[in-house]
Image (spheres, rainbow, N blue to C red):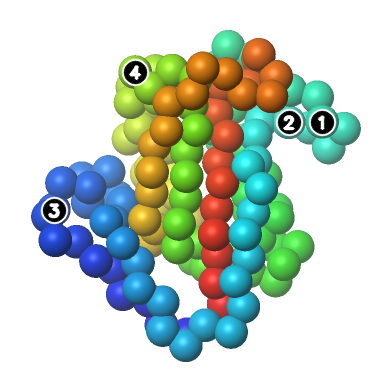
Amino acid sequence: MKTRTINPTPWLQHFNLHHGVEVIGASRTLYLSGQTSTAADGSTLHAGDLGAQFRTAWANVKDALTEAGMGPSNVVRLNIFVTDVDAFMAIAGEATGQIKADGTETACTLIGVARLFDPEVMIELEATAVA
């Protein structure tokens, strides 16, 4: 499998993200449900701390990828749902830096929502991965 990033304009690269990712020769596609800052029993972790919630949600994405025999480098699309876009933009450098450090080259969409399944959940990460 090979991937090629698509960037008709450079502004998203400032966030370590891409306008698109072309996939050539993949044989498997994994669609992950939204991953949040939750423990194994489903309880919410890190109420009120968006940075910590991002880190836990991203760790949960990586755990699901591992279960499927994949890793962060297999992620080609990431949707980020947040209850406070401004708060996310304040930590965007840290968040996208972690994604990049883990070897992820992804297309990404940031979506502001009124709330998620639990009022204490501030972020949800939905990923598509290929292998």
- What is the C-alpha distance between the residues marked 4 and 3? 22 Å
Label 2, secondary structure: give it: loop
- What is the C-alpha distance between the residues marked 4 and 2? 22 Å
- What is the C-alpha distance between the residues marked 1 and 2? 5 Å
Q: Classify residue 122 as left or right of residue 109.
A: right
Of residues 127 and 67, the one drawn nearer to the viewer in this rendering: 127
- What is the C-alpha distance between the residues marked 3 and 1? 39 Å
Splitting the image into 4 quarters, where does residue 28 fall?
bottom right
Label 4, secondary structure: give it: helix
What residue is at 47 percent from the left and 50 percent from the top?
Answer: 78
- Whether label 1 touches label 2, CB < 8 Å: yes
Sequence-wise, which precedes: disc 4 or disc 3? 3
Give amino acid for label 3: Pro
Sequence-wise, which precedes: disc 4 or disc 1? 1
Label 3, secondary structure: give it: loop
| Residue identified by numbered label 1 | 42
| Residue identified by numbered label 3 | 10
| Residue identified by numbered label 2 | 38
- What is the C-alpha distance between the residues marked 3 and 2? 34 Å
Splitting the image into 4 quarters, where does residue 56 fall?
top right
| Residue identified by numbered label 4 | 86
